[in-house]
Amino acid sequence: MIPHSKPTLNKEDALAVEDVINSGYISQGIIIDRFENEMAGYIGVKGGVAVSSGTAALHLSLIALGIKEGDDIAMPSFVCPALLNAAKYIHANPLLIDINPLSYNIDVADLKKKLTHKTKAIIVPHAFGLPSDIEDIMNIGISVIEDCAQSVGATYKGRQAGSFGNCAIFSFYSTKVMTTGEGGMVLSNSDTLLNRVRDLREYDHKAEYVMRYNYKMTDMQGALGLSQLKRLNSFILKRRNIANVYNERFSELGVAIPSVPPERGHIYFRYVIRNRRQKTEDRRQKLEEDLKFFEANGIKCMRPVYKPIHKYLNIKGFQETDKAWNELISIPIYPSLSDSDVKDICEAVRRWRETGY
Ligand SMILES: Cc1ncc(COP(=O)(O)O)c(C=O)c1O
């Protein structure tokens, strides 16, 4: 079975972690400083603060931006519940936005329609590694957290995703483009924001009490992060090469391929294909069958978003998100796929296409 996702790890990664263990200093220390500086340098912003997860990065970013109980935070519905959790942690309200059906990113028209004086922040994921309409969103004039959990290294007009917003968050969970096992980071050009996040991530040795957290990242994780960052460009190149093979082969098969505007650099964290079966109402059930079909053919595929937020909250009115949830299949794409794996995946898609998909 070809797994749906897999971290790209090698001996150098293992040695980097081993060095930290041998040093005897394994918790947050100078390796974390280095990881933060190198990540900030890569994205092209002033600084960063490493934390224990992408969710922790979102949580502390919201507090540092001054978002309070009762404020609204705009976010797309077609994402994992980490964004909803971060809003709930501070007793703020999620303001759910539909997606653009071509990019699967937040729909700017729907966003503008729903904004009110209560909306104090917008969380903008670059879904599946494709940058969102970040310039238009920045022009709205509300605080923006770019969510780069799926898009480290993606670009918009040649500039790194994560360098536009008031701050950006990253996740280094094991299946992300680069990993520290679990982990996250906040990057920003604002010293004030970074200092606030840095203060909040640990609770001890403080002159004054405010409620703080234990969201630190260890030097063992930081060493893995630094080692992965060295190879990040090669990871992205490999993902793009595989996407090119898929694009070419799927175009021949008549399977729709991702639409990427020329000013955007997609990193293909996910590669999704659409179930276009006859009747719309059949598609959800068919999707389950499609996933089983691929599994029977040795390929583990998944829904790119397990369940949209509005479904968890039992609210309606997200037409494009519903469609994407009913139709999208995420197929394996990661650097350690061999040429023969890629061939097998293309062959399975060909067979799937023949079933009438
Ligand atoms: C878009 C997005 N934001 C945030 C997160 C949360 O990251 P973490 O799992 O590190 O808490 C994820 C995780 O999958 C994600 O996909």
Image (cartoon, rainbow, N blue to C red):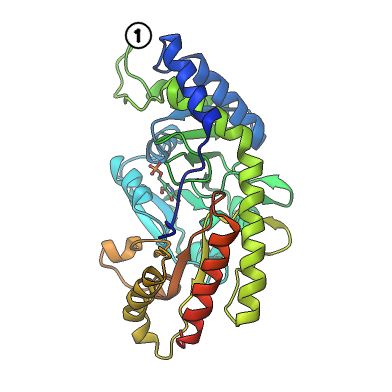
For the N terminus, the quadrant is bottom left
Residue at 53 percent of width and 25 percent of height: 192
Q: Is residue 106 above or below residue 334?
A: below
Residue 314 falls left or right of residue 19: left
Which residue is the site of mark 1? 207
Residue 297 falls left or right of residue 48: left
Residue at 45 percent of width and 79 percent of height: 275
Measuring from the top left, give residue 213's x and y in whole percent. Answer: 31, 26
Residue 114: name its quadrant.
bottom left
Measuring from the top left, give residue 210's x and y in whole percent. Answer: 31, 21
Q: Of 209 and 282, which appears nearest the observer?
A: 282
Residue at 34 percent of width and 86 percent of height: 281
Residue at 61 percent of width and 53 percent of height: 239
Q: Of 181 and 138, which appears nearest the observer?
A: 181
Toward the bottom, the furthest residue is 278
Q: Of helix, strand and loop, which one carries label 1? A: loop
What amino acid does circle 1 point to? Ala
Q: Of 46 and 295, which appears nearest the observer?
A: 295
Q: How many marks?
A: 1
Measuring from the top left, give residue 243's x and y in whole percent. Answer: 62, 61
Residue 357 in view, yes or no: yes
